[in-house]
Image (tube, rainbow, N blue to C red):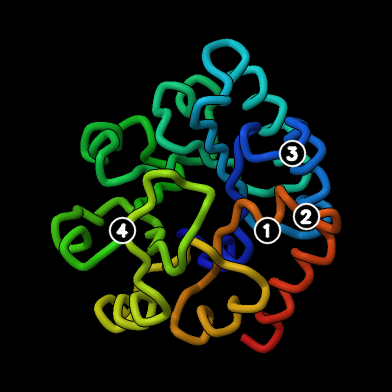
């Protein structure tokens, strides 16, 4: 059974998101600070490919194992299978879950959902959580859709009272509390961690909103 508390501070990143290209350092600091899940999302013009991407994935996975934090691969089904990652996160235009479920039956499966039409057309039978958003404008994803605001989270929670929801898109420690109050089980973030000079403080600021939950 998937523990929705794993979504509380869900760090997403690839080497292209860091200022110095040292994602291992950033992830290590984030793990020490208390992130609850990590997604390896290596995409874009500066992203690694092939053997270099796999090598980095293995190194990051090893760091997560030491901290007992789930390591999720974004989109790349072949890589997730090859390194036996803890899970896979898919977008609406990625491989269909029914095509990969045999290889990920005992793994964490996440699916991006940006509106109710996408929710309705998605088979959530094997989905452990949905990533809902973008909530706000985001510079981290060039293909991000129109922001839905807090209301998107609130309405999605009313639409499905049970499924674990992680909010995505433009989230910071200053708007995190409102998002959680609207019904999200957690928040995902890229730049607030990768661009920070005090990762410990950033993660601590996120985590404090869950103390009474």
Residue at 46% over, 68% down? 136
Q: Position of residue 154 (x, y in %)?
A: 37, 82
**Quadrant of the image for the C terminus?**
bottom right
Question: Residue 155, position in %: x, y?
Answer: 30, 81
- The quarter holding residue 173 reads bottom right
Q: Nearer the viewer, residue 14 or 128?
A: 14
What's the residue at 26%, 41% (across, down)? 97
Alpha carbon of mark 4 to alpha carbon of mark 3: how far? 29 Å
Which one is in front in this view, the residue at disc 4 or the one at disc 3?
3
Q: Nearer the viewer, mark 3 or mark 1?
A: 3
Distance from the alpha carbon under mark 1 to that under mark 2? 6 Å
The alpha-carbon separation of the residues under discs 4 and 2 comes to 27 Å
For mark 2, what is the residue? 196
Q: Which residue is mark 3?
A: 19
Earlier in the chain: of badge 4 and badge 3, it is 3
Residue under label 4: 113
Residue drawn at x 40%, y 50% is 110
Other-residue count near label 4 (Cα within 10 Å), few / some / many at <14 / 14–19 / ≥20: many
Residue 192 - label: 1
Q: CA distance from mark 1 to mark 4?
A: 22 Å
Task: Give SS at disc 1.
Answer: helix
């Amino acid at each position: 059974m998937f523990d929705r508390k794993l979504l509380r501070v869900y760090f997403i990143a690839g080497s292209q998101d860091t200022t110095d290209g040292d994602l291992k350092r950033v992830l290590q600091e984030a793990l020490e600070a208390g992130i609850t899940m990590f997604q390896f999302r290596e995409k874009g013009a500066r992203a690694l490919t092939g053997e270099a991407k796999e090598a980095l994935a293995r190194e990051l996975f090893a760091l997560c194992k030491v901290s007992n934090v789930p390591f999720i691969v974004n989109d790349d089904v072949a890589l997730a299978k090859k390194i036996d990652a803890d899970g896979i996160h898919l977008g609406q235009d990625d491989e269909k879950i029914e095509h990969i479920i045999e290889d990920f039956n005992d793994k964490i499966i996440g699916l991006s959902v940006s509106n109710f039409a996408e929710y309705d057309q998605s088979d959530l039978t094997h989905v452990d959580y949905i990533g809902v958003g973008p909530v706000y404008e985001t510079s981290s994803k060039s293909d991000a859709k129109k922001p839905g605001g807090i209301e998107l989270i609130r309405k999605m929670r009313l639409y499905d009272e049970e499924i674990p929801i992680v909010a995505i898109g433009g989230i910071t420690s200053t708007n995190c509390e409102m998002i959680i109050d609207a019904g999200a089980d957690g928040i995902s973030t890229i730049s607030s961690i990768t661009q920070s000079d005090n990762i410990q403080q950033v993660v601590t600021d996120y985590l404090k909103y869950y103390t009474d939950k």
